[in-house]
Image (spheres, rainbow, N blue to C red):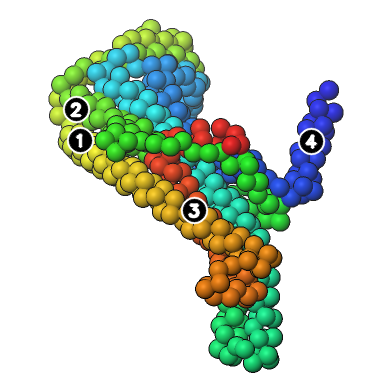
Amino acid sequence: MRRPRSKWVMLSVLAAFSYLRATAQVSLYTVADLALRNSTSVRMAQADVMRAAAGLTESKDAYIPNLNFGSSLGYSYGFPLGEPSVFNVSSQSLLFTFSQPDYIRSARAAVQSAEFNLKDVREQVILDAALDYIQLDKAQQTLAALDQEKQYSDNLVSIEQDRVLAGVESRIELTRAKLTAAQIDLKYIHLKNDAEMFRQQLAHLTGLPATSFVTNANSIPSTPRNIVLPQEGQSAALQNAGVQAAQANAKSKLYVSYGDARQIFRPQFYAGGNYSLFAKFNNYSEFYQNFQYNNFDIGVQIKVTLFDAAIKARERRSAADFARATAQADQARDTASEQIYQLQQSVNELTAQQRVVQLRAELAQEQLEAIATQLNDGSGSANGPLLTPKDEQLARIQERQRYEDVLDANYAVLRAELSLLRSTGSIEDWAKAGPK
């Protein structure tokens, strides 16, 4: 049953990739999910979690007896030296030290730090993938607007050429119209190159071919307003995964320093046992009255370190590591707090700018409608300037430009909001929220 099931899984995966190529449209949720699966940063962070978990297990396993098998066969002449045994089995384990519980707590905190670091890396990957996806979506919408704007600019050039030939317009206006068309062409080429760059970046993040990326604006979730109040920045910084990782790392260093400080003048208890089968060809029986081949011992070893310069140096080093880790945690907290406050203020400012840009776009749309109405109906003010098709094309170009400004303003606000979600540890929930 396993082979047919594996075959169907492979066919399903191939069908999914074929579907992506056929539809040429990928949602933001899919991009974020594939980016997390394909990211080398995430894989390295996951390996760090596994390594920290193995370190925790290693610190606990010090209490589990080990088992060793060996042999020391050899020839001896005269009085036998050592214990030439056919084989020997030995076992030893830690019973109790004052330091080992601290080392276990340190390893457990290291696991927490690695897990928080993994979360922080995941959130950064999601932010990078989301911003690339949203920029590609904005580029596609802007390119569509530029196609219309280019059509209007070509019409304007044609109108200006007719007016110049008719002698009612100077060549300066024709040159100005050509300059407008050339600027639109330049912007189109630049934006198209940007769109291809975003596709390449998304391809590297997700592992999908770059040609498969056509965005779906409806798949972009909306962001919550008033994510964090300015006065809550300090407490919000504690929700930052990077800050939590730094604090857990400082806690791990603290327990290491505790453990190293408890090595001197404190007893350490070990349990051990050994069995050896001595060889018969080393003349033991000639030199020992009661020689026997089977030998066994078991006992408890008690060790008290009165002085060890290496241990004292390690104690000072672990104390310095703890001091540095604490300073790094405080620095990360303060940096995150300041960043959250600045992003909140930036969101407020960009939202106000967004409102201004939207009103300008609405005004341009209303002016275009008014000009189109006057040209179609022949109505207008008797004292006002006479409207011409040139004015209509200029109004259409301006309306498209204001629409492009709205797209830029919307992206600036969304980028600031996503950065704020990233700083407060909520961007992964946003990415999983589904379409707006």
Earlier along the polypeptide chain: callout 3 or callout 2?
Answer: 2
Q: Residues within 10 Å of mark 1 (few under 14, many from 20)?
A: many
Residue 303, x across and y down, in percent: 23, 19
Question: Which residue is labeled 2 in the image?
Answer: 261
The percent position of residue 431, horizontal first and vertical second, equals 54, 37
Q: Earlier in the sequence, mark 4 or mark 3?
A: 4
Residue placed most toward the observer, 320 or 74: 320
Residue annotated with mark 3: 358
Marks 2 and 1 sit apart, C-alpha to C-alpha, by 9 Å
Q: Is residue 194 above or below residue 28?
A: below
Name the kind of residue labelled 4 in the image. Answer: Ser
Residue located beneath label 4 in the image: 12
In the rendered structure, find residue 319 and report the number of the disc placed on it. Answer: 1
Q: Which of disc 4 and disc 2 is earlier in sequence?
A: 4
Marks 4 and 3, Cα distance to the nearest angstrom?
Answer: 45 Å
Contact check, label 2 and label 1, Cβ < 8 Å: yes
> Which residue is found at the position 33% from the left and 13% from the top?
95
The quadrant holding residue 323 is top left
Q: Does residue 197 appear in the picture of this structure? A: no
